[in-house]
Amino acid sequence: MLSLEVLTMAGRLARAMGQPLEAVAIGPKGAAAAGIPSSYGVSTLHVAGDPRLAEYAPAAWAHAIVELADQVNPAVVIGTASDRGGEVMAHVAARMALPMAANCTDIQLGDPFIVTRQRWGGSLLEDAHLKGRVKLLTLAPHALTAEPSPSRTEVATRAFRPALDDRDFRVRFVPQVEADTGKVSLAQARVVVGGGRGVGSAEGFAWLEELANLLGGAVGCSRAVTSLGWRPHSDQVGQTGTRIAPDLYIACGISGAIQHMVGCRAAKHILAINTDPGAPIVAQADYAVIGDVQKVLSAVNAEIRRVKAGEPSRSSA
Ligand SMILES: Cc1cc2nc3c(=O)[nH]c(=O)nc-3n(C[C@H](O)[C@H](O)[C@H](O)COP(=O)(O)OP(=O)(O)OC[C@H]3O[C@@H](n4cnc5c(N)ncnc54)[C@H](O)[C@@H]3O)c2cc1C
């Protein structure tokens, strides 16, 4: 959970500055997180109490944060660099008329702060000076590993009700009820089977679907695939798609363009299946199988099916 990474970084900053760490919970996930902060060194958890904040509304969430900042006068406000976190913090910066440094990976205290931040989809790291009476930042996903603070704290929970305006809700998320497919989501999956142009067709994804099912994972794809209309955009991994952090990413017929790798660089292991040994993904993968994706997956899937059925594997037969 990216919020825990932010709490980890914020805790380090607070300890270095000798300041208390306070957190704000907005929306259903924020409320669900109410039990977490004690192990992350939070002294006060501010819970925004307006029921209209239950669903995502970027200007309203920002309004709540700005109003809280006016009350508690923080030295630093730090959020996640998720799509929503970045949007809310941009609103916060605009409302407070302050600069905001997005996608930070490292923060050096001082005046100004010196922050290292990701640019160009993570292909470039920039050192920047961050000024302002309140330092506003977002932390790049997976810039560090979330870890509880060295000491637990007694958390005081404080409800507050921001004075929201109807105009704050001009942009808001309206949930749609979808049938529960029972499938694991791309962002949360421990195994992702990704397909690129090399899969050859929409129908070719049947092998990837089967492998993902066998491994309890999810199917992802490259932008070439969504552009061809083979898969929906919700399956796209990358700079303009979902960022994934599975234990294993199996990249099938994907060349490994930088915009794709931005989305899967947090994978613990990458296995590439590609006909071209010179494809960039092969150099970046932990393991590579050089071969036609359909042939490789038909053999891999058959082997996994056999093992699952309790039959001896062909390699040990
Ligand atoms: C602003 C911007 C944002 C972008 N955002 C994203 C993004 O979010 N995600 C993303 O993925 N891309 C993104 N792109 C596009 C990106 O630059 C690449 O064009 C894209 O990732 C390429 O997709 P691909 O690897 O499937 O296709 P290709 O680059 O065409 O690669 C196909 C690969 O399949 C291999 N292959 C061919 N046949 C077979 C076979 N039978 N078996 C096995 N392997 C085979 C080939 O050797 C090759 O390596 C973005 C581009 C821009 C400019």
Image (cartoon, helix red, strand yellow):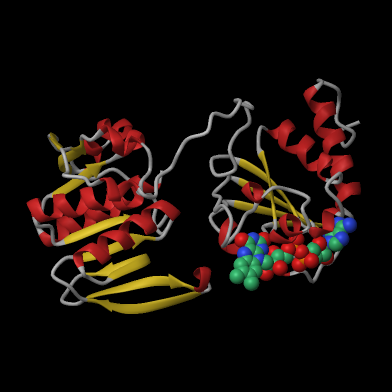
- Image position of 17 with respect to 201: above or below: below
Q: Give the quadrant of the C terminus.
A: top right
Image coords of residue 64 (percent x, y):
21, 48
Q: Is residue 230 left or right of residue 55?
A: right
Q: Give the quadrant of the N terminus.
A: top left
- Report if residue 284 is visible in the image: no
- Report if residue 206 is visible in the image: yes
Q: What residue is at 38 percent from the left and 58 percent from the top? A: 86
Q: Residue furthest front?
A: 166
Occupied quadrant, residue 80: bottom left
Image coords of residue 283 (percent x, y):
70, 68
Q: Nearer the viewer, residue 65 or 168?
A: 168
Image coords of residue 310 (percent x, y):
81, 20
Q: What residue is at 28 percent from the left and 40 percent from the top? A: 26
Occupied quadrant, residue 103: bottom left
Q: Nearer the viewer, residue 236 or 278?
A: 236
Image coords of residue 296 (percent x, y):
87, 48
- Image position of 314 with respect to 69: above or below: above
For ligand 1, which image quadrant applies?
bottom right
Q: What residue is at 51 percent from the left and 73 percent from the top? A: 120
Q: What residue is at 24 percent from the left and 38 percent from the top? A: 37
How many discs appear?
Answer: 0
Q: Nearer the viewer, residue 114 or 171?
A: 171
